[in-house]
Amino acid sequence: MGVQTETSEAAQWISCPECRELVYAKRLERDLGVCPGCGSYSRLHASQRMEQLLDAGSAVPFEAPVTVEDPIGFADSLPYPERLRHARERTGGSEAVTCVTATVMNHPVIAAVMDFRFLGGSLGVGVGERIVRACDTALRTRTPLLLVTASGGARMQEGAYALMQMAKTSQALAELDEAGILTISLVTNPTYGGVAASFATLPDVILAESGARIGFAGPRVIQQTIQQELPEGFQSTEFMQARGFLDAVVPRAALRPVLGALLGMVRPDGLHAPPSKAVRLIRDPAELPERDPWEVVRLARHEDRPTTLDYVYQLLDDFQELKGDRLSGDCPAIVGGLGRLDGRPIVLIGHQKGHDTVERVSRNFGMALPEGYRKAGRLMRLAEKLGLPVVTLVDTPGAHPGVEAEERGQAWAIAENLRRMSALKVPVVSVITGEGGSGGALALATADRVLAFANAVYSVISPEGCAAILWKDRTEAPRAAAALRLDARDLLRQGIVDAVLPEPPGGAHENPVGAADTLRAALGAMLHELTRLNPRELVELRRRRFRRYGIEDARTI
C-alpha cells in the first residue's frame, strides 16, 4: 500500500489507504510502516528499507556503472531521458535499485534494494547491470547476496534491451549457485513481470512480506485475457506460499533477525570441536533385550512420542523453517530448514506427525505427498551448495497413499530423492525416531550413518499391510511384526542401522528432554566423524554401504 497525507502540517497524520484510519506519522515510522489499525504494510523507499534491515552505518554504496540510457530512442508523451530525469529528481536515486556492501547483525552481505518509486521499479539496462555487479561482487568476495524486490516488470522504454536483462541477471545468479554462495530474496509489494521471472525467484531462500503480490502477469491483465474471476488472495504471498513458491512469509519486524540468522549459517567459524558430551551408542545386538515386536510397534507409534519439531526446538539454535518445493506446493508432513547444532550449521529435515488428532490430520499423519519429498530434495541441494551436513529424522507409516499423490508423481519424487541422497557431497546422518515405513522412510534415510532409537521400527511395509496381503487378515499384524524383523535389535543384527540410541525408561515420550540430549550427543559424534571425510570418500562409502545389502560376502564390494 502507499500512504496519503491527510493534512499539510508537516504531515503529522497519515491516512491508511486500506482502512482509512488516521495514523500519527511518528507512530507509523516506529511501527516500521505497518498500520496499527488493519496491519497493512506501507511501501518503503529503498533508503527506508536499508535503514530497517542493515546494521546502522554499515552500508557502502557501489559506484554507479556507466550504461546506455536511451538504447532505442523511445518517446511517448515525453522523451525517455526526460522521464529518467524526473524519476531521479523525485526519488533522489540514480536508478530503481541501490546496491551496497553492508552487514546484517554483524554478518556481511551484498544487498541490492529496489525502489518502486523509480519508474515502478522497472527492470532496464541500469537495473540489470547493477544487479549483475552486485552478483559479481558477491562472487569475488564470497559474500551472501540479498535481493529486495519491488517492481512492475520490465521497462518498456528500453525495448528488447530490457528483456535481455532477465537472462543477464539469471546468468549471474547461476554463477553464484556454481560457486556455493548463499542467495536470499525478499519479495515486497509488488513484484511482477521480468523481475519476478528472473532474479527475484531464483535465490536459495525466498522470503516475502505479508500481503505483497508476486507473479508474472498482473491480475488486471489476466482478468482481461481470460475473462474469469480470480481466486481470493490471488498472487498474494500467502497464496503463493501455499503453492510451494516461497519459503516463509515474515512479519516486517522479524525480517532483520531472520535475515541475520540465515546469513549466520554460512559465516566461517573455524573447525568444530569434538562433541563435549559422550553418548553410549549400542552397536552389539546382544546388548538389546528380546522384546515383543508388536509392543515395540505400539511404542514407536505412541502419540506423545517426540516429533521432528519437538527435537528441532530442543536441539537447534536459530532454526529457520523453509517451505515449498518451488513447483506445486508445500507438504506439512515433512518439515525442514537451517539451524545450528552446538554451533555447527546444518540442514535438518524430518517427518512431522503431530500429537493431537487435529495436527495429525493436518499433517497427513506424517505421510508425505510428492511435494514433501521434492521440498526435502531442494533442501538437500541447498545443503550441498553451502557445504552443510544433512540430518534427517524419520517417523512415518509410509508415503501418502492417495489419488492426489499418484497424480503428482509419488514414485518419481521418492526415486529422485534416493538418487540425490546417494550422490550428496556432504555428510548425511539419518535417525529413525519412530516408524520407518517403506520407501516413504527410505527417501529420507539413504545416509552415511543410519541410527535408530531403541523403540523405533523400520520395515518394507507396515505389519497391518503385510498381514492383509499374506494372511488376508489385518488382525494378524502382531504375527507380521514378528516375521518382518523390524525392531531395533533385528535391524542392528542385519546391519540396516549402524547403532541404536537408548531411550528413557518407558520410551522417549516419558522424557523428551532426555531423548533430545541423547540425540544431540549422537548427532555430534556422527558429524564429527563424517566431516573428516572428503566429498569423494563420502559418496563412495555411502554407495558401497547400500550396495552390500544381500551380498553373501560384502568384502568383495
Image (cartoon, grey):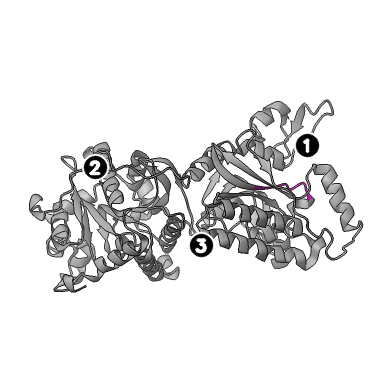
For the residues labelled 3 and 1, the Cα–Cα distance comes to 38 Å
Residue 474 percent across, percent down from the top left: 19, 63
**On screen, residue 87 above or below 194:** above
- Mark 1 vs mark 2: in front: 2
Residue span colored magenta: 112-118
**On screen, residue 156 above or below 296:** below
| Residue that appears at 66% across and 66% down | 167
> Sequence order check: which comes first, mark 3 or mark 1?
1
**Residue 140, quarter of picture:** bottom right
Name which residue type carries label 1.
Answer: Gln
Q: Quick one: 208 or 118, which is closer to the camera?
A: 118
Q: Which residue is denoted by mark 2 in the rendering?
A: 518
Judge the density around disc 3: few (<14), some (14-19), many (≥20) Cα neighbours within 10 Å.
Answer: some
> Sequence order check: which comes first, mark 2 or mark 3?
3
Q: Secondary structure at mark 1?
A: strand
| Residue that appears at 65% across and 34% down | 57
Q: Which residue is denoted by mark 3 in the rendering?
A: 328
